[in-house]
Image (cartoon, rainbow, N blue to C red):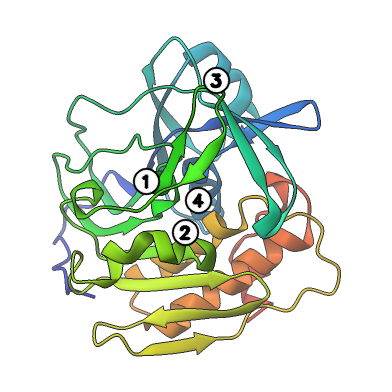
Amino acid sequence: MRARARRGAEAARFDYVTVGHVTVDVLAGRRQPGGGAFYSALQAARLGLRTQIVTRGEPAELEALLAPYRGELEISIVATDATTTLETWGRGHARKQRLLAWAGAFEEPLALDAAILHLAPIARETPRSWRGEVELVGLTPQGLVRAWDARGDISRVALTAEQLPARCDAAVLSTGERESCDALFTGATPGAVLAVTAGALPTRIVQADHAELEVPPSMIAMPRDDLGAGDVFAAAFFVALHEGLSPTAAAAHGNAAAGVRIAGAGPDAIGDRRAIQARL
């Protein structure tokens, strides 16, 4: 990862900022908040970081959806007529989703002030550039390799170099997304630390020379719910990298955070530092 000089006495306004759609997830008829921007931000907040979500959607709907978490997070909403809504069913690699509504892409340049900026697209909405100072830029590209038809049925497409942000220090993707994300592995993001998660199999850290290191997963006796586990991994991974841990040690923290999440149900299962440390 490219070294970044830390600021002197002037602190960033936020420790961790996610940019992406907070979604309405429709699961078995119930509606709950979702999206990488939400799950990752909540994990960062529970690690003790000052955290903000920058999102798009219908303000009243998002305010109501996120009301239980407003004591932990700050929210900046770009108002639109609709909130991105996903119908979701299945688990793990068998999970399927249908896009029922889309809040649109970020069009105006964003002014950001963060130690860690996490670009967390769910449906091709995040900007390639921004104004302001950040120390580490993390990317979860799942939303950049999604396309959908008129019915909202989602398919996976190839990531292009033109879709990548102007700067990327680290990225997290799943093994199922790897084939679509070849641009990340062919020099489009020089120096970036890449982590490829694989559920119950080891996470792979891809180094600049393309050598790969395996990091064992966190073992879970009775997994309950894996929705958002990859986003939780990403937040813990980016935070650990920013705190100076090696990529493999950071991945171990990410695996432990995902393990805590999967052992419980819903966003309330996202753990704090103590719960994550107990799994290392």
Element type at mark 3: helix
Would residue 179 appear left or right of 24 to someone viewing this image?
Answer: left
Q: Residues within 10 Å of mark 3 (few under 14, many from 20)?
A: some
Q: Earlier in the sequence, mark 1 or mark 3?
A: 3
Residue 104: x and y in percent read 37, 23
Element type at mark 2: helix
**Residue drawn where x is 45% and y is 20% of the image:** 57
Q: Nearer the viewer, mark 1 or mark 4?
A: 1
Q: Nearer the viewer, mark 1 or mark 3?
A: 1
The three-letter code of the residue at mark 3 reads Glu
The three-letter code of the residue at mark 2 reads Ala
Q: Which mark is residue 235?
A: 2
Q: Earlier in the sequence, mark 3 or mark 2?
A: 3
Q: Which mark is residue 274?
A: none
Q: Which residue is mark 1?
A: 144
Q: CA distance from mark 1 to mark 4?
A: 17 Å
Element type at mark 1: helix
Q: CA distance from mark 3 to mark 2?
A: 23 Å
Q: Quadrant of residue 17?
A: top left
**Residue drawn where x is 54% and y is 40% of the image:** 72
**Residue drawn where x is 40% and y is 39% of the image:** 52
Q: Which residue is mark 3?
A: 63
Q: Residues within 10 Å of mark 1 (few under 14, many from 20)?
A: many
Q: Residue furthest right?
A: 222
Would residue 62 appear left or right of 195 to someone viewing this image?
Answer: right
Q: Which mark is residue 40?
A: 4
Q: Residues within 10 Å of mark 4 (few under 14, many from 20)?
A: many
Are circles 2 and 4 on residues that touch, CB within 8 Å?
yes
The three-letter code of the residue at mark 1 reads Leu
